[in-house]
Image: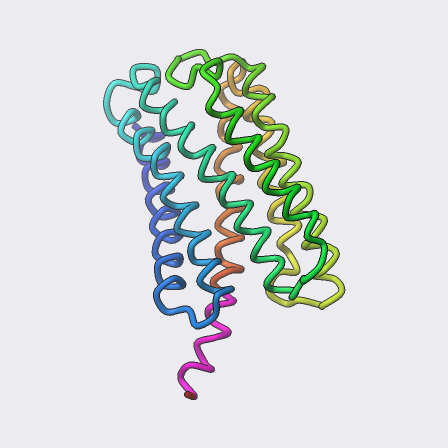
């Protein structure tokens, strides 16, 4: 019962923050950059909801194993939306730092995104199974991790050049999200307690959304002056 209460409260606060912040940025943001950041936040919250809400329901009812299919379907949806999240974050990077060249990077990111989604769609993933194969769990996360590494490097390079006060910690936030996520992929099947790392991973995403929210807050004073 304690786990159900703690996880439910944490998940509801997280989802409420990501969705609320995203919707506000989408509706009230003045620039395409802020609107794109808002879409990114909404996608994050909506995608995670497909996994977290069934998980909360399972904890309050007959347990996680009894709802393996629903949880697996949620993980599948979240895998797709998180892939799109990082592609959007890449375009946030391009717009934030006014990157006009390096078009080959766009093709690389789009290719990795398409590959990741294609791998997620393979029936061998056995998403609805209570015991999905680890091999495909690793395989589908290779292009996803590659997207993450590219994002980390790009934000680190341009953020340092521009002395960006908003996104200066973006490389750290993304690094932490993967540092906490990958052990879950590799070891949670054998050691269930490793799954607790999803909490700090989620907090890393909250940090990302907070940085995007700061972009919106920077616009707000300008709007009031107008």
Give x and y (percent) for residue 41: 44, 52
Q: Nearer the viewer, residue 106 or 162?
A: 106
Quarter containing the C terminus: bottom left
Which percent across, then down, holds residue 95?
A: 59, 63
Is 115 magenta? The answer is no
Image quadrant assignment for residue 174: top right
Residue 172, image x, y percentages: 65, 49
Left or right? Give the position of 180 relative to 30: right
**Horizontal arrangement in the rendering, residue 43 relative to residue 117 (left or right):** left
Q: Is residue 73 above or below residue 94?
A: above
Q: Is residue 207 left or right of residue 69?
A: right
Report the magenta stretch's main SS: helix
Viewer-side residue, 131 vs 62: 131
- Tell me, yes or no, whether the highlighted magenta stretch contains residue 219: yes
Residue at position x 53%, y 32% in the image: 197
Residue 55, relative to residue 163: is it above or below?
above
* Region in magenta: 214-225
Which image quarter is the N terminus in? top left
| Residue found at the very far bottom of the displayed protein | 225
Name the residue: 67% across, 62% down: 99
User: How was the colour assigned to the protein in this rendering?
Assistant: rainbow
Image point 51% across, 47% down: which residue? Answer: 205
């Amino acid at each position: 019962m304690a786990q159900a209460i703690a996880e439910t409260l944490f998940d509801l606060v997280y989802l409420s923050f990501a969705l609320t912040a995203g919707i506000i940025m989408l509706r009230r943001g003045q620039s395409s950059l802020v609107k794109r950041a808002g879409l990114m936040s909404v996608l994050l919250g909506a995608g995670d909801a497909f996994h977290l809400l069934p998980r909360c329901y399972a904890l309050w009812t007959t347990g996680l194993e009894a709802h393996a299919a629903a949880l697996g379907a949620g993980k599948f949806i979240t895998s797709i939306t998180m892939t799109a999240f990082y592609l959007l974050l890449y375009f946030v990077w391009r717009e934030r730092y006014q990157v006009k060249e390096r078009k080959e990077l766009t093709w690389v990111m789009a290719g990795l995104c398409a590959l990741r989604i294609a791998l997620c769609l393979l029936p061998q993933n056995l998403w609805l199974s209570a015991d999905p194969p680890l091999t495909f769990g690793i395989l589908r996360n290779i292009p996803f991790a590659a997207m993450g590494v590219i994002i980390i490097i790009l934000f680190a390079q341009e953020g340092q050049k521009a002395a960006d006060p908003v996104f200066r910690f973006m490389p750290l936030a993304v690094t932490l999200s993967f540092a906490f996520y990958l052990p879950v992929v590799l070891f949670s099947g054998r050691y269930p307690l490793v799954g607790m790392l999803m909490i700090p991973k989620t907090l890393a995403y909250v940090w990302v959304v907070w940085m995007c929210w700061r972009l919106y807050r920077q616009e707000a004073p300008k709007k009031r002056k107008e």
